[in-house]
Amino acid sequence: MAGFFKDIPHIRYEGCDTDNEFAYRHYNPDEIVLGKRMEDHLRLAVAYWHSFAWEGGDPFGGRTFDRPWFGDDMAHAKIKADAAFDLFAILGQPYFCFHDVDVRPEHDTLAGNIAALDEIADYFGPKMEATGTKLLWGTANLFSHRRFMSGAATNPDPAVFAWSAATIKSCMDVTHRLGGENYVLWGGREGYETLLNTDMGREAEHAARMLSMVIDYKHKIGFKGQILIEPKPQEPTKHQYDYDVATVYGFLKRFGLENEVKLNLEQGHAILAGHSFEHELALAGSLDMLGSIDMNRNDYQSGWDTDQFPNNTPEVALAYYEVLRAGGFTTGGTNFDAKLRRQSLDPEDLVLGHVGGMDICARGLKAAAAMWEDGGLERARKARYAGWDTPEAKAMLDSDLDTISADQLALNPNPEPVSGRQERLENYVNRFV
Ligand code: XLS
Ligand code: NI
Ligand code: NI
């Protein structure tokens, strides 16, 4: 390997006993897990923005990284692409994801931006072919540039709505052209800073119109990928309209769009919304809305979206358990929407951050699969609701309050509480993780 990652070997599976830092201990793409290759379960993806566009800044300081591709012109964008595809090859990750602004230089005009995106997509094509890396999803960055400070689809200025629509169209075109398997909408600034200047009713209508146009355009160009919304409760705005799974589902139902869209759920966003990741996954699964995941955690003390690589096997195992319960991924996968810490300067850090994340995901998946195969949780769940299997109980759901009141004694004259067995179930889970 030449260039930025020179001297770093391709990472291979060597098993738990290896002391080679540059090896996978658990991620073994060809290992069969529940009848399917591990790689095909996890469908791991590198996030272009954190790994190649982010410069190491935080609210108190700017760039810490020194990368040969930093510079806002096409020549630098191509050096960046060369390095990105080198990383994909080193890791053997099957997928990547990007926003338009991650991959192209910024122009003053929309036409300039679109032409630059097209040019870089042409540059990606042969590289994707050569490395075998596929596009899990594409998306538009409608939150970084100052024109989007008051939102994109929900901006009070119709000219920004138009700019956003045209940008989304160009990103959908490129995602489609590169064989992308999904298209993501994350509403970074679709929300408000203060209610004092905000018309929430109107903004919801505008967001729904934009989404309808996206769906229509998808069908028009024959894009077979899945449209995904990524919920997040706040940050950068004080309040975001795509708060969590329940909120987004309510929004989609209100506008009749629930059959056209699924969800891309992020671990850190779930926590910011006051949920666990498995809560969000289980709810999406129960609504048939689970599309894809962003597997990056937050620091539990910082309380904001720190986008760290996963490193907690029990948490990851419970997440993949819900993914398995929901039937596994179809077009979706596991995107590392994760960045290094800003002191992690070296090329090795970027490689090993991913290696660690991939191993944790593999461990989590294997634990989840073992739990699923053993069936203990599902047996316990089934037993807990077994009362509902009787014809009398089923009939009650089609009945009315009067009849139930008259018949109540027939079912059970004096119901006794039954243990929820939480500790026993926690002990059970701990046998696997
Ligand atoms: C930010 C989001 C973002 C989306 C893609 O918090 O996670 O990175 O995944 O726009
Ligand atoms: Ni995020
Ligand atoms: Ni994300």
Image (cartoon, rainbow, N blue to C red):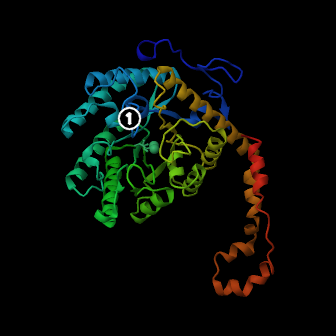
The answer to whether 86 appears left or right of 299 in the picture is left
Residue 266 at least partly seen: no
Position of residue 332 measured from the top left corner of the image (x, y, whole percent): 50, 42
For residue 106, what is the image quadrant? top left
Q: Residue furthest front?
A: 60
Say few, some or many: other residues with alpha carbon within 10 Å of mark 1 (under 14 / 14 to 19 / 20 or more): few
284 vs 299, nearest the viewer: 299
Of the four image quadrants, the one with ligand 2 is top left
* Residue 10 pos. (x, y %): 54, 17
Count of numbered labels shown in the rendering: 1
Please provide percent x and percent y for residue 297. 54, 41
Residue 144 seen by the camera = yes
- Residue at image point 52% right, 43% down: 293
Q: x%, y% of residue 127?
A: 39, 22
Residue drawn 65% across the image and 87% down it: 402
Q: Nearer the viewer, residue 421 or 320?
A: 421
Quadrant location of the C terminus? top right
Horizontal arrangement in the rendering, residue 422 relative to residue 204 (left or right): right
The residue pinned by badge 1 equals: 61
Q: Under tag 1, what secondary structure?
A: loop
Residue type of the residue flagged with mark 1: Gly
